[in-house]
Image (spheres, helix red, strand yellow):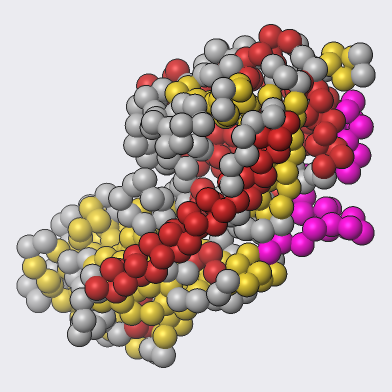
Amino acid sequence: MDLDTPVREYLPGFELKDPVATLELTPRDMMSHRSGLPRHDMAWYNNPDLTPAELFKRLRYFTPNKELRETWQYNNMMFITAGYLVSQVSGESWRAFTQEHILNPLGMGSTDFSVTVSQQAPDHALPYGEEDGKAKLVPFRDIDNVGPAGSINSNVEDMAKWVTLQLGNGTWQGKRLLREATLDAMHTPQMVIAGMPTDSMIGPRSYGLAWFVDTYRGHFRVSHGGNIDGFSALVALYPQEGIGMVVLSNKNGTPMPEYAVRRISDRLFGLEPRDWSGEGLARQAKAKAAQEASKAEEEAERVKGTHPSRPLEDYVGKYENPGYGTIEITGGKDGLAVQYNGMSAPLEHWHYDVFRAGKNDSDPALEGTKVQFVGALDGSIEGLKVPIEPAEEPLEFKRGSDPKLSDPAYLAGLVGRYDLADGTAVTVTLSGTSLTITLAGQPPYAVVPQHNDTFALKGRETYKARFTVVDGKATAITFIQPNGVFKAPRVEGGD
């Protein structure tokens, strides 16, 4: 596989929203994070049932915020796609390929691809977060489906073998596992990372193929970290000196691995020591203070004294986005809750038709997320917006149809004849799970189920037909159109 051949030549079904990127994006682009896409991590986060093949199909719905190769933006979706590419080209799964060509030759027998497997080890680490200044045990996060973007679990002994391969020009115990040119390309800058250094001891950063590249106090450094709920890790290489380090920690989002690498590097290179840990703690304290100030600012922006525009039960339903799947709003008049990718949280009214996800002690991932409900011209709720991707405007989720509006038994109660006030006959017929509405003198109209006993005319979604249903049988149709609202009572005895 050539890294500079467009992905589409290996995967004919590959499609992005940007037609130019669809035709030109290469494996090198994917592995150096220059696809033009922001992270879009919530599309896969906590959804182990979503396969790489399904994620691959969703790529076409993610909006880019940059041009191809314009800006470095970390993107796990591209690495998931790279794993899918490996499986399609090699004919075996990414896991099997990695096991056969990397883990087995290196003897990395304690390395696996799932937290379910890693927990079977008698001395496995437990994941921790922090709450009110104290360590708190958190659940393992199942990210098996993201594959090469971060599903590998290992230990220091196995990782030392991987580091030795990186420092040995691609050889291990006299056997070549990687071409030297391949290894050089991995450690060579492929894409500049925007931004000036904030510390004189750390040089400008760029990105190789799955490695960050910079200098530390004049020493060329190749490194990469990883973070998931309860764990933070860092691998750092000094290829010119033949030095490698692996720091694994079981705390969520801690900068400790980076400061440990700096401290060890100072000692190995005989450099004047610097209190990296003390500086890091001071920086962390400032960050916490800023976070608290941000909460106060957020509260100040809240519009007091407002109320939801509709009864709470009117917001209940499933809302769909082709790239992100389904958000479900549950509950009713006593309160609402949001569910997404197996995560849930209570919804608290914020202001107007905006709600905010509250605290869920078992899984705080959604806490603080705001949900804005969007109304239609007829007064119903037709969708919601969520700022689920920080680099984009809030994404829109369209309200899904009520399942009963595709149930033939329920639809049978809507079939019959109705008359408009001017005497125009309206006939409703059923074929399978679909209704057809025919006005005398006009062609039949197929309709699309929505909710609240309402259907939209297919291809003319601003035209709607809402049935009044009593005891399972429709008594009237109300046609809601841009030019007015027209009611057609059911003709008694009509079929």
Q: Quadrant of residue 140?
A: bottom right
Q: Is residue 377 left or right of residue 492?
A: left
Tell whether position 91 is magenta: no
Task: Give the answer, above or below, for where 131 lies relative to 275.
Answer: below
Pick the front one: 370 or 56: 370
Is residue 226 at least partly visible in the picture? no
What are the residue bounds of the magenta stretch?
103-128
Q: Is residue 396 left or right of residue 3?
A: left
Q: How many marks?
A: 0
Asked if the magenta segment contains residue 121, the reply would be: yes
Q: Residue at x 70, y 69 (%)?
A: 137
Q: Nearer the viewer, residue 295 or 314?
A: 295
Residue at x 55%, y 12% (from the top left corner) = 5
Q: Does 133 appear above or below 61?
A: below
> Is residue 301 visible to the viewer in this orientation of the structure?
yes
Residue 67 in percent (x, y) is at: 35, 27
Residue 408, given in percent of the width and then of the height, sits at 48, 69
* Magenta segment main secondary structure: loop
Judge by depth and name the residue closer to the eye, 96 or 492: 96
Q: Residue at x 37, y 36 (%)?
A: 64
